[in-house]
Image: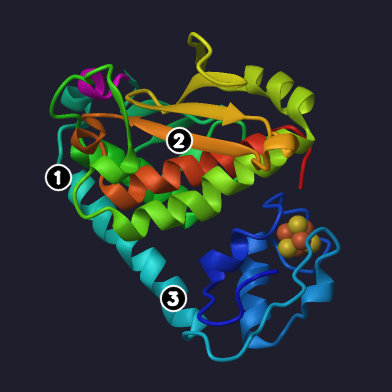
Amino acid sequence: MIPAMGLTPLEIVRHLPKTNCGECGELSCLAFAVALLSGKRTPRDCPHANLEGLSLSGGPNPSSELDQAWRILEEVKTEVAGLDLRARAGGLGVEWREGRLLIPYLDGLVELTPRSARRIDGLELDPRDQILLYNYVRFGGKAPLSGEFVGLETFPNSVSKVATLRRYAEERLARALSERFATLRKALSSFRTREIPAEADLSFEVYVLPRVPLRIHFWRPEPEEGLPPEAKVLYDRLALEYLDLESLVFCAERFTERWLEVAGIR
Ligand code: SF4
């Protein structure tokens, strides 16, 4: 069930497959979300998502929300335009080639210039992805990673973000892994992962960006003990040298979404 009030287009996109298949009559899932909030489309127009419980009333103005996302993107791009991108490449762990940064991102490679960011395999990057990528470049990596992993709750002012991480990444991971463990494990090979000694039923590190590893642990449910499946996402202790708190949470959320997509789970 999707929470009824306060939905924005970007929040609705979280509940869509993000395949941009066009079957709803819109060019992309994001365009469908906007059309949904404007009343042009209904939840039934997307045959690939269960939008039961979605309320289209009472939320913020969709066009202003979208405008805001694009405005933030333009602001970050403007900041990045004033930077020496070539000089930043090393600190970000990315390659500089022919006037652009080549940034490994999730299971793809992104070409980024001050004007545009696109996956070289043609897969669409929505504004959230682009804001994340430009933020990564803007931060520039101020210190080497520590190699020590901690929970998000150890970072300052993280209370509300911990709840977001729980809802959009950890709970989804726990549920999906308890149902489709083998499929998801196989799909991990599409990402930049590193095996680590198992501390749980599944433990691994995945690089969302070259200097943004997530350490993920999963524990199977133990019905006899009354314990549900559990997942925990950890970050490098110095992750805030590379991204702000909100972007770090988005990294986990986006990895979760993409992992399920790659595994064919919707
Ligand atoms: S039909 Fe659904 S999955 Fe396909 S583009 Fe529209 S919203 Fe996205």
Q: Position of residue 209 (x, y in %)?
A: 40, 29
Point 34% across, 32% down: residue: 235
SS at mark 1?
Answer: loop
Q: Residues within 10 Å of mark 1 (few under 14, many from 20)?
A: few
Q: Where residue 65 is drawn, which disc sits there?
A: 3
Inter-mark Cα distance, 2 to 1: 34 Å
Residue 154 sits above or below residue 86 on the image:
below
Q: Are marks 2 and 3 in contact (CB under 8 Å)?
A: no
SS at mark 3?
Answer: helix
Q: Position of residue 92 (x, y in %)?
A: 27, 25
Residue 218 sits above or below residue 175 on the image:
above
Query: Identity of the amino acid at label 2?
Result: Val
Q: Nearer the viewer, mark 2 or mark 1?
A: 2
The span shown in magenta is 89-93
Q: Position of residue 25 (x, y in %)?
A: 79, 69
Query: Identity of the amino acid at label 3?
Result: Glu
Q: Nearer the viewer, mark 1 or mark 3?
A: 3
Label located before the other in sequence (2 or 3): 3
In the figure, is residue 148 to the left or right of 132? left
SS at mark 2?
Answer: strand
Q: Main secondary structure of the magenta part?
A: helix
Q: Position of residue 256 (x, y in %)?
A: 58, 40
**Where is mark 1, residue-wise?**
82
**Where is mark 2, residue-wise?**
233
Inter-mark Cα distance, 2 to 3: 29 Å
Label located before the other in sequence (2 or 1): 1
Residue 111 sits above or below residue 244 on the image:
above
Residue 151 sits above or below residue 166 on the image:
above
- Residue 36 in sight: yes
Q: Nearer the viewer, mark 2 or mark 3?
A: 2
Q: Where residue 23 is drawn, which disc sits there?
A: none
